[in-house]
Amino acid sequence: MAVTRTFSIIKPDATRRNLTGAVTKMLEDAGLRVVASKRIRMSREQAEGFYAVHKERPFFGELCEFMTSGPVVVQVLEGEDAVKRNRDVMGATNPANAEPGTIRKELAESIEANTVHGSDSDENAKIEIAFFFSPGEIVG
Ligand code: CMP
């Protein structure tokens, strides 16, 4: 299995509850390594750009509002089959449907305040990583 990278966001509901470490531990325990990390307050422009694929969805405005409501931690994660590994440990988008032991089942508040984002493909991981990080900020 190839070692690959994925992009993760620890969302405002988690930073508000001081869960940055708890989330990161679950990622690390799942075999992922944090090779870049920074705590930022996303601008409205960044949130709208990052989630542009969802701009026609009814929840787009609220999603951007939520993602700019507090600090987030953007991370690059590395590991074997990182995109799938991260999605497995995150659990389903809606915590009500997530498996026990996953981040969203254990920690998320709602489908919107769902604690973490993770890339859904290797192709999108590359795009999302480049949205927030320059190559020199990633140290594997
Ligand atoms: P994320 O993986 O960050 O990608 C898009 C986000 O939109 C998703 O996680 C959820 O937080 C949010 N989302 C998806 N569906 C809904 C919904 N029906 N209502 C509110 N937010 C949603």
Image (spheres, rainbow, N blue to C red):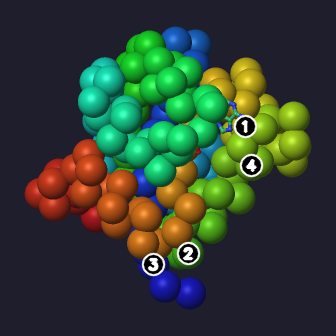
Q: Which residue position is annotated with label 2?
A: 81
Marks 2/3: CA–CA distance: 6 Å
- Please, is residue 2 above or below residue 139 in the view? below
Residue 88: image location, x then y, percent: 71, 59
For label 4, the crowd category at 10 Å Cα-Cα, with few meaning under 14, some 14 to 19 and many 20 or more, is: many
Along the viewing direction, whichever of 11 and 85 lies nearer the viewer: 11
Query: Please, is residue 25 above or below residue 11 in the view?
Result: below
Please provide percent x and percent y for residue 101.
81, 44
Q: If the image is split into quadrants, where does the C terminus sit?
A: bottom left
Q: Which residue is mark 4?
A: 91
Tell me which label, 4 or 3, sits earlier in the chain. Answer: 3
65 relative position to 105: left or right: left
Residues at marks 2 and 4, CA–CA distance in whole angstroms: 16 Å
Q: Which is closer to the viewer, label 3 or label 1?
A: 1
Q: Which mark is residue 104?
A: 1
Q: CA distance from mark 4 to mark 3?
A: 21 Å
Amino acid on which the number 1 mark rests in the picture: Arg
Q: Amino acid at mark 4?
A: Gly
Q: Are marks 4 and 1 in contact (CB under 8 Å)?
A: yes
What's under tag 3, amino acid-wise?
Val
For label 3, the residue is 3
Mark 2 and mark 1 lie on one chain; the one further toward the N terminus is 2
